[in-house]
Image: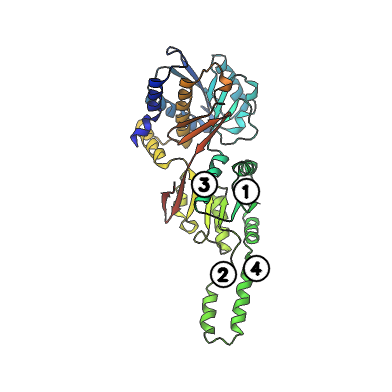
Amino acid sequence: MKKFFKIVLTIIIIYITNHSFAFSQSEKIKIGLLIPLSGEYKKLGESIIKSTRMALNDIGTDNIEIYPMDTGIDPNQTLQSAIKLKNKGIKIFIGPIFFKSLIYLDEVQDVVFLSLTNKTNDLPKTVISSGVNSLSQINAIKNFLELNEVKKTIFLTPDLDYKNEIKKAIKQSKIKISKQYTYDTEPTKLTKQIEKITNYEIRKQNLADEILRVENSDLMDKEEQIKKLEKKYTIGNVNFDSVVISDFDENLKSVITSFIYTDVSPKNKLFVTLNQWFDESLFLEENIQPLYYPSINRQNLETFNEKFFNEYNSKPNHLSLLSYDLLGLVYYLSLKSDFSDINNIFRKENSFKGKIGIFDVKNNKIYHRLNFYKIDGGKIKEIF
């Protein structure tokens, strides 16, 4: 896996060997880095600076100059920082990190912001979302369901601010689902909704009716059959083969637990969720396994984390890996394009292989080709 740390440099060498430069070798590529360097997210910003330093070392060029600037979590401060950097001749930025920091950036023209957010709705025209967005994840889920020939899938999304992102991605991906549900995250209301989705009361009554029927029958093995029935919770199947839950952390666990309560288990239906960034707490919850989800390449992430720790004696945030790859992506595109035409630099169709996986760039959008993983028995396995 050490070869992956040189992937950007390898691509560049191949391209230089076979193509002419799109810029002068003496020309510097100036990249603004809009990150929090003060306040509660200061450590995150520092981690991103370290990862870009790693990327510079791995690329091995003197043609890139990085200009960090503090954004905090204030959109006004973000705007002022962006203007200051633009006045220094900077046209391309990595950052900002947070979606709420983007709201005034349409005031800065003729530049490109590669924001680390994974949200794609309501972005300023100069902002490109480079995070692992909903469409990238649902495309991977679609591939997984088709691979397993799943016929009926239901899709559950919490009534939270990202629900419209999910609905849009479902439509764009053309994933085949039988029903969509929006659920309340309040535990009591959630349980009631899951009971309705799974026809729990009807299936529970089916069991009670069957026990009564057997009790009133003249069957020779009546007592034995009653004992078997009393070990069950419900009778009757549900009208789906797989469940996709677009949630995270304790909310995700709560939703799956509610399904188990209604006698629908991951042991007999496919339970799929969104990118969990290899949340280790999920490994401990064997009652909600097997659980499937898309994510970036795990081996690459672990190799990156190890190298980062060896160099800085600290653990990186997963956004550090994304910023590492974005620097390589910018340099790769600089070899193919004229940066004076910054408005069209990300419109052309390109693919780039980085540590996080493969980026597909087209029409000012960045998508990720994700791997797929299964957690079962406290262990994780790569599906594709």
Residue bearing mark 3: 143
Identify the mark nearer the N-term, 1 or 3: 3
Structural distance between the alpha carbons of marks 1 and 3 = 23 Å
Task: Report crowding for label 2: few under 14, some 14 to 19, many 20 or more residues within 10 A (C-alpha).
Answer: some
**Can the viewer see residue 105?**
yes
Identify the mark nearer the N-term, 2 or 3: 3
Q: Which of pointers 2 and 3 indicates the residue nearer the eye?
A: 3
Structural distance between the alpha carbons of marks 2 and 3 = 34 Å
Identify the mark nearer the N-term, 2 or 4: 4
As drawn, 108 above or below 207: above
Asked if marks 4 and 3 touch (Cβ < 8 Å), the reply is no
Asked if marks 2 and 4 touch (Cβ < 8 Å), the reply is no
Q: Which mark is residue 336?
A: none
Q: Please name the amino acid that badge 2 sits on.
A: Tyr
Identify the mark nearer the N-term, 1 or 4: 1
Residue bearing mark 4: 202
- Residue 9 horizontal side relative to residue 276, left or right: left
Asked if marks 1 and 2 touch (Cβ < 8 Å), the reply is no
- Residue 340 horizontal side relative to residue 305, left or right: right
| Quarter of the image where the N terminus is located | top left
Residue bearing mark 1: 158
Structural distance between the alpha carbons of marks 1 and 4 = 25 Å
Where disc 2 sits, the SS reads: loop
Residue bearing mark 2: 233
Task: Report crowding for label 1: few under 14, some 14 to 19, many 20 or more residues within 10 A (C-alpha).
Answer: many
Colouring mode (rainbow / by chain / secondary structure / one colour): rainbow
Q: Which of pointers 1 and 4 indicates the residue nearer the eye?
A: 4
Residue shown at the point (50%, 57%) measured from the top left: 288
Task: Report crowding for label 4: few under 14, some 14 to 19, many 20 or more residues within 10 A (C-alpha).
Answer: some
